[in-house]
């Protein structure tokens, strides 16, 4: 788990984040994701300066193991000087050894954030879910941590002023805010009341703006006028134009009966949905079960 250094902003990892959300739905199923409707609450991971360091860290780790439903996993937490914020040693289990950077001895309020990421590594390891490459796999871990209810801790660990900055994880603050907003829209949860960092709240607001724009992209009926005009233009030229590029937002193809079908990403889980081009239709995403009103 990375920490420190200049804080990157914006959405440089957005496509990987969206792929990670899709991968979670595919691997866990809609029903399993629904069991994470309640986030970790601050009282469960609170850490006072008067708490015993090791006993307190073990207590917080136990709460996160419970949240991720890993009842037979036992985390042994230790502290040492290291470059990264934290590290977990994978083994057959049920015991896993987690090392935290020595600086958490005096920054105890962020221990929950560091452990949330490391326990998610264990969870994904047991699921046998990973992305190729260290960078993408860490983005998957941050995204899963946030979407499954513990990542607000990681965003709240982001603090920045004129003299110093701190951020845990590989996502930018705005990307953490985006995933947290996607989760909030699915479960009707408002995590902003838990933030102690004003910078975290700002990043969440920006992420929510982007998450809401996901739900207003053509051909959804809530799309803006200009976007729907662009979609209509692309539809008119679909049969005469070049084949769509892989990853293009809208991909048109004949359905075998002389009519067109269009595929586009679900605004919730980003799985591609394929519907006929025939005016207004209702479509249900096979992964997250979202019901979409489409103007095709």
Image (cartoon, rainbow, N blue to C red):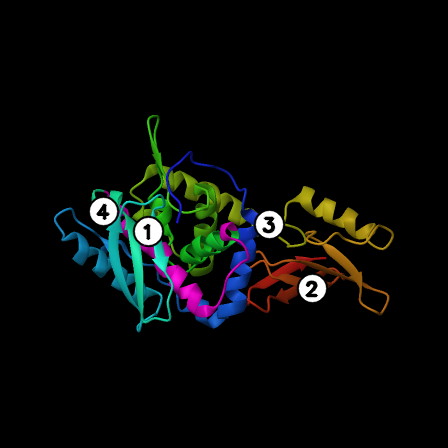
Could you say whether the residue bearing mark 2 is in a helix, strand or loop? strand
Could you say whether the residue bearing mark 4 is in a helix, strand or loop? helix
Sequence-wise first label, 4 or 3: 4
Q: Image height check: is 3 above or below 246?
A: above
| 3D distance between C-alphas at marks 4 and 2 | 48 Å
Residue 216 or 181: which is nearer the viewer?
Answer: 181
Q: Residue furthest left?
A: 50
| Residue drawn 70% across the image and 47% down it | 228
Single out the mark in the foreground, 4 or 3: 4
The residue singled out by tag 4 in the image is 108
Q: Image height check: is 89 above or below 218?
A: below
The residue singled out by tag 3 in the image is 216
Q: Residues within 10 Å of mark 2 (few under 14, many from 20)?
A: some
Residue 122 picture location, percent across and down: 38, 63
Could you say whether the residue bearing mark 1 is in a helix, strand or loop? helix
The residue singled out by tag 1 in the image is 114
Sequence-wise first label, 2 or 1: 1
Q: Which quarter of the figure has residue 165?
A: top left
Sequence-wise first label, 4 or 2: 4
| 3D distance between C-alphas at marks 1 and 4 | 10 Å
Residue 281 picture location, percent across and down: 68, 63
| 3D distance between C-alphas at marks 4 and 3 | 41 Å
Q: Residues within 10 Å of mark 3 (few under 14, many from 20)?
A: some
| 3D distance between C-alphas at marks 2 and 1 | 40 Å
Sequence-wise first label, 2 or 3: 3
């Amino acid at each position: 788990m990375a920490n420190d250094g200049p804080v990157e902003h914006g959405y440089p990892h957005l496509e990987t984040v969206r792929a990670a959300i899709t991968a979670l739905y595919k691997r866990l199923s809609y029903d399993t994701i629904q069991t994470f409707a309640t986030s970790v609450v601050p009282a469960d991971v609170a850490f006072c300066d008067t708490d015993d360091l090791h006993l307190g860290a073990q207590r917080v780790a136990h709460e996160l193991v419970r949240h991720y439903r890993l009842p037979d996993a036992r985390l042994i937490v230790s502290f040492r000087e290291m470059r990264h914020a934290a590290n977990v040693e994978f083994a057959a289990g049920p015991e896993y050894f987690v090392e935290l950077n020595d600086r958490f001895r005096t920054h105890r309020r962020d221990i929950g954030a560091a452990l949330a990421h490391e326990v998610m590594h264990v969870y994904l390891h047991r699921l046998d879910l990973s992305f190729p490459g260290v960078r993408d796999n860490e983005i998957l871990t941050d995204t899963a941590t946030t979407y499954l209810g513990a990542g607000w801790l990681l965003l709240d660990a982001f603090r920045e002023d004129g003299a110093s900055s701190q951020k845990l994880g590989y996502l930018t603050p705005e990307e953490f805010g985006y995933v947290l907003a996607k989760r909030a829209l699915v479960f009707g949860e408002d995590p902003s009341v838990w933030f102690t960092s004003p910078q975290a709240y700002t990043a969440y607001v920006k992420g929510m703006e982007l998450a809401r724009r996901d739900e207003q992209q053509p051909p959804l009926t809530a799309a803006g006028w200009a976007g729907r005009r662009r979609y209509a233009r692309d539809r008119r030229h679909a049969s005469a134009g070049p084949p769509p590029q892989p990853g293009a937002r809208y991909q048109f193809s004949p359905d075998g009966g002389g009519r067109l079908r269009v595929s586009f990403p679900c605004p919730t889980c980003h799985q591609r949905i394929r519907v006929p081009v025939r005016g207004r239709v209702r479509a249900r995403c096979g992964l997250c079960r979202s019901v979409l009103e489409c103007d095709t």
